[in-house]
Structures are given as structure tokens and as C-alpha cells.
């Protein structure tokens, strides 16, 4: 059974930082690319950041470039999203996704709220 479990969300003030984690089980983690998505209330889910199987290639949505960093630790079956200089518009539920070919697995999400 595939499980992706996100953690690290919470309430943070504008300008603050959070580090999200996504722990995977039930898959051969190092064979999968990993992505972070987010969904704000009333909006569609959107891509935030992605990383290839060995961490050698990453890409980001324009809205988070220079502020967010995606990384992975294949020994721990975990992908991370370091979020700095957070803005109120970053408020959303953040989801991780494992992808390999036509296979896609999603986590349950973790809430990030940026507010003073």
C-alpha cells in the first residue's frame, strides 16, 4: 500500500519560514520523481516544485522561485519543501505527489497559513 504523509504545515507570519516533509512508503522511492502542489480555497490545485529521482534536477513555479527549495533524501524516503519569505498568498493546503510514468500517488495534504 502506497502512503505519502506530509507534515510541517502550520501558521506562520508573513516573511517567515516553514519546512514541509513528505514521507513515502510502499514505493521504491528513488525510482520516483516527486512534486509539491498546493490548493488555496476556491482555486485549482497548482504545481509548486518538482525534483527528479536523484535530486539532480529541480523546477519551480514562477511564484515561488527564489523563495522555496525542494530537496530529497532517498535514504529516508522523504522529500522536503523549504519555504522562506512566506507571503499571505502562499496560504494553501500543500500536497506531495510521487510520479513515475503513468503512476501518480498523492498525499493527504498539510495546511499552511500565512497571516499576521
Image (cartoon, rainbow, N blue to C red):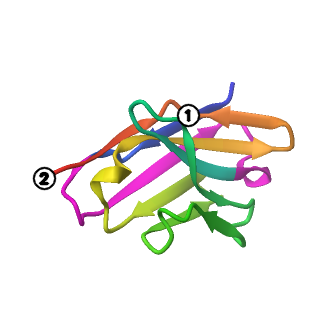
Instruction: Indicate the position of residue 44 as horizontal and vertical percent values.
Output: 53, 35
Dot 1 alpha-carbon crowd within 10 angstroms: few under 14, some 14 to 19, many 20 or more: some
User: Which residue position is annotated with label 1?
Assistant: 107
User: Which residue position is annotated with label 2?
Assistant: 116
Label ID, residue 96: none
Residue 26 visible here: no
Mark with earlier residue (1, 2): 1
Query: Which region shows up in magenta?
Result: 11-33
Locate residue 8 relative to residue 72 in the image: left or right.
Answer: left
Find residue 10 and report its image quarter.
top left
At x 47% / y 35%, what residue is drawn? 43
Magenta segment: does it hold 21?
A: yes
Give the quarter of the figure containing the N terminus: top right
**What is the C-alpha distance between the residues marked 1 and 2?**
28 Å
Instruction: Indicate the position of residue 95 as horizontal and vertical percent values.
Output: 52, 40
At x 42% / y 30%, what residue is drawn? 42
Instruction: Indicate the position of residue 39 as horizontal and vertical percent values.
Output: 47, 38
Secondary structure under the numbered disc 2 in the rendered image: loop
Which residue is farthest front? Answer: 42
Which residue is farthest left? Answer: 116
Locate residue 34 relative to residue 111 in the image: left or right.
Answer: right
Find residue 58 and report its image quarter.
bottom right
Q: Relative to the observer, which residue lies in front, 90 or 7?
A: 90
Instruction: Indicate the position of residue 73 as horizontal and vertical percent values.
Output: 59, 61
Find residue 14 and report its image quarter.
bottom left
Amino acid at each position: 500500500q502506497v502512503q505519502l504523509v506530509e507534515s510541517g504545515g502550520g501558521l506562520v507570519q508573513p516573511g517567515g519560514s516553514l519546512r514541509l516533509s513528505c514521507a513515502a512508503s510502499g514505493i521504491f522511492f528513488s525510482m520516483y520523481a516527486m512534486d509539491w502542489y498546493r490548493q488555496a480555497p476556491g482555486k485549482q490545485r497548482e504545481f509548486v516544485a518538482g525534483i527528479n529521482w536523484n535530486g539532480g534536477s529541480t523546477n519551480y513555479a514562477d511564484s515561488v522561485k527564489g523563495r522555496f527549495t525542494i530537496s530529497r533524501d532517498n535514504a529516508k524516503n522523504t522529500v522536503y519543501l523549504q519555504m522562506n519569505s512566506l507571503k499571505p498568498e502562499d496560504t494553501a493546503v500543500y500536497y506531495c505527489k510521487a510520479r513515475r510514468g503513468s503512476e501518480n500517488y498523492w498525499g493527504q495534504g498539510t495546511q499552511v497559513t500565512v497571516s499576521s
